[in-house]
Amino acid sequence: MGKKLKVLYNKKTILKRVKDLAQQISKDYPSGELILVGVLKGGFIFLADLVRALIIPVHIDFVRLASYGASTHSSGKVKILKDLETSITGKDVIIVEDIIDTGLTLEFLKQELFKRRPRSLKICALLDKKSRRKVEIKVDYVGITMEKNYFVVGYGLDFSEQYRHLPEIFFLDP
Ligand code: PRP
């Protein structure tokens, strides 16, 4: 039997928050010389909607990361499966993530990208599961702060590669 899906954030809520974030980013980078770094796979739909709501031109690149070690996410060991194809040295960069949970993935990515000496480096996340944080990390642009520790799927997020295509965000009701 499949698990039950219950809507947590509907299309209207998601798109309103995406639009707000895009407005803020457009205002903060008026010159438009910005590189958005999408984190695959989960962030692909958020990034696609975000860039279409911006009123500044941007460059887009992607990384793909993977947790490894004994207990995947909690081990904090992350490696790069696919690296950027663009140099970010001297550039303004925003990492675009679908969700921040423990913060370990972003902590790693931030440190990696800092080594390449960007002019600035910020983080934009659609969902922030604050209560689950293991490392302190500053999230500059947050779409929605999740109060509860739901396991969420849809809008790019998966459960064993299922449900990424769904247009709304659901929580899994076991
Ligand atoms: C998710 C999400 C973040 C990470 C957050 O990716 O997209 O990259 O987990 O977790 P953390 O804050 O605890 O490090 P996931 O590993 O599920 O891969 P996917 O995006 O390919 O689904």
Image (tube, grey):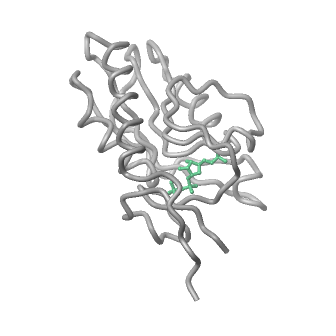
Picture coordinates of residue 69, whole percent (x, y): 74, 58
Q: Is residue 110 left or right of residue 52?
A: right
Instruction: Tell me the quarter of the image containing the N terminus.
Output: bottom right
24 versus 128 height, above or below: above
Which of 118/127 is in front? 127
Toward the bottom, the furthest residue is: 1
Q: Tell me what residue is drawn at x 55 percent, y 22 percent.
A: 114
Instruction: Tell me the quarter of the image containing the C terminus.
Output: bottom right
Picture coordinates of residue 79, whole percent (x, y): 59, 48
Picture coordinates of residue 41, whole percent (x, y): 44, 55
- Using the rendered view, name the quadrant where residue 107 is placed: top right
Q: Is residue 9 left or right of residue 108?
A: left
97 versus 56 height, above or below: below
Number of numbered tags placed on the structure image: 0
Q: Tell me what residue is drawn at x 53 percent, y 70 percent.
A: 5
Picture coordinates of residue 115, whole percent (x, y): 55, 23
Which of 2/98 is in front? 2
Q: Tell me what residue is drawn at x 57 percent, y 58 percent.
A: 152
- Using the rendered view, name the quadrant where residue 67 is placed: bottom right
Which of 2/96 is in front? 2
Q: Tell me what residue is drawn at x 60 percent, y 42 percent.
A: 100
